[in-house]
């Protein structure tokens, strides 16, 4: 009985912990259960999951804190009843935190409505360039197909664009994943003329910027999954990354330098492409 009580208490604690993370579709915890940690280059093919057109969103600082909710647990049901009450309370808190993030995202989107308007009908397939041959379309999709969900972001001034994408490979049953990671590409800071041209409908210039972000993400995903970055022996460094929230310090290693950008693998195994300090912001290029 004592062992059973201990098991229930551990379950209670795990429920409280599991309910502490709200859902975000631009976040992933690194997972790699692939054989040898990689796939063959000839086996690399990808599809866009739940994404057909450009998904543009406003940048915001994800603060999911909520006011503490006071609750009095009833003891009449014993430990089993306490477990049920804490599980319910945990689910309520998680729902509230997720809803707060949704509201913050909606507020940020309101600030860039004009940019959302000019990007919402751009098909992703028109932006992938030389990777078109690796794109798998239609259903059913093989469990060997890499899934990607690219999300584009803009600051409130609509002069700095970036992209985040969760990249994953499902198990054969497709109820779990063999691989999952997050890739982020920082785009150019637009001058006033570029910004105005884009907002006034210059589709060619806009497509070049969005394409550079998307192709950069695919380039990194392919190199990572096919083992191009596994032999990197660079020492960890601290990188200062500027964003709308200010400057944040990130620990990681440079796995590749390309076209004025540093491709960084951080301590969570996420990847990002960020311009070298001495380089003027420019479009990320897969060939230079």
Image: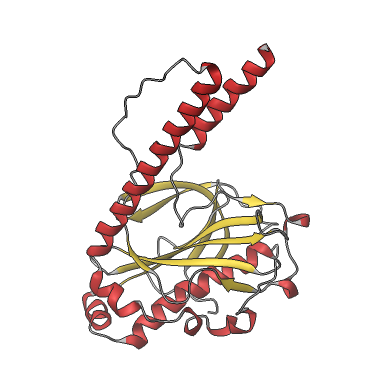
Residue at point 25%, 76% (across, down): 195
Whether residue 286 appears in this view of the structure is yes
x%, y% of residue 104? 29, 52
**Which corner quadrant of the image does residue 117 belong to?**
bottom left
Between 95 and 179, the residue placed more toward the observer is 95
Residue 228 in view of the camera: no
x and y percent of residue 115 in the render? 28, 74
The residue furthest right is 35
Query: How many numbered discs, if any?
Result: 0
Residue at the extreme top of the image, as rendered: 2
- Tell me how the rendering is colored: secondary structure
Q: Depth check: 16 or 266 in front? A: 16
User: Which image quadrant: the N terminus?
Assistant: top right
Judge from the rendering whether residue 110 lies leftward or rightward of residue 139; answer left or right: left
Pinpoint residue 277: horizontal percent, then vertical percent. Answer: 40, 60
- Res 106 → quadrant: bottom left
- Residue occupying the point 31% across, 56% down: 105
Residue at 54% across / 76% down in the picture?
A: 286
Note whether 73 is above or below 190 in the view shown: above
Left or right, residue 10 beside residue 69: right
In which quadrant of the rendered view does residue 91 lie? Answer: top left
């Amino acid at each position: 009985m004592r062992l059973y009580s201990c098991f229930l208490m551990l379950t209670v604690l795990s429920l409280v912990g599991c309910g502490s993370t709200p859902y975000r579709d631009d976040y992933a915890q690194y997972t790699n259960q692939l054989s040898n940690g990689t796939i063959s280059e000839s086996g690399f093919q990808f599809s866009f999951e739940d994404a057909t057109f450009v998904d543009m969103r406003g940048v915001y600082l994800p603060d999911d804190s909520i006011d503490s909710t006071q609750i009095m647990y009833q003891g009449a049901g014993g430990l089993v009843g306490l477990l049920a009450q804490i599980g319910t309370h945990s689910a309520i808190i998680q729902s509230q935190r997720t809803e707060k993030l949704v509201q913050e995202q909606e507020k940020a989107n309101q600030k860039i409505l004009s940019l959302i308007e000019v990007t919402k009908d751009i098909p992703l397939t028109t932006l992938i360039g030389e990777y078109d041959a690796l794109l798998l379309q239609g259903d059913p999709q093989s469990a060997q197909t890499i899934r990607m969900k690219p999300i584009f972001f803009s600051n409130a001034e609509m002069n700095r664009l970036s992209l985040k994408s969760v990249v994953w490979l499902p198990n054969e049953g497709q109820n779990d994943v063999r691989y999952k990671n997050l890739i982020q590409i920082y785009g150019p800071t637009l001058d006033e003329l570029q910004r105005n041209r884009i907002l006034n409908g210059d589709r060619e210039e806009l497509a070049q910027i969005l394409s550079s972000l998307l192709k950069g993400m695919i380039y990194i995903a392919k190199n990572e999954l096919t083992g191009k970055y596994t032999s990197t022996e660079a020492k960890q460094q601290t990188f200062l990354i500027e964003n709308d929230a200010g400057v944040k310090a990130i620990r990681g290693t440079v796995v590749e330098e390309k076209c004025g950008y540093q491709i960084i693998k951080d301590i969570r195994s996420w990847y990002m492409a960020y311009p070298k300090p001495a380089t003027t912001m420019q479009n990320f290029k897969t060939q230079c």
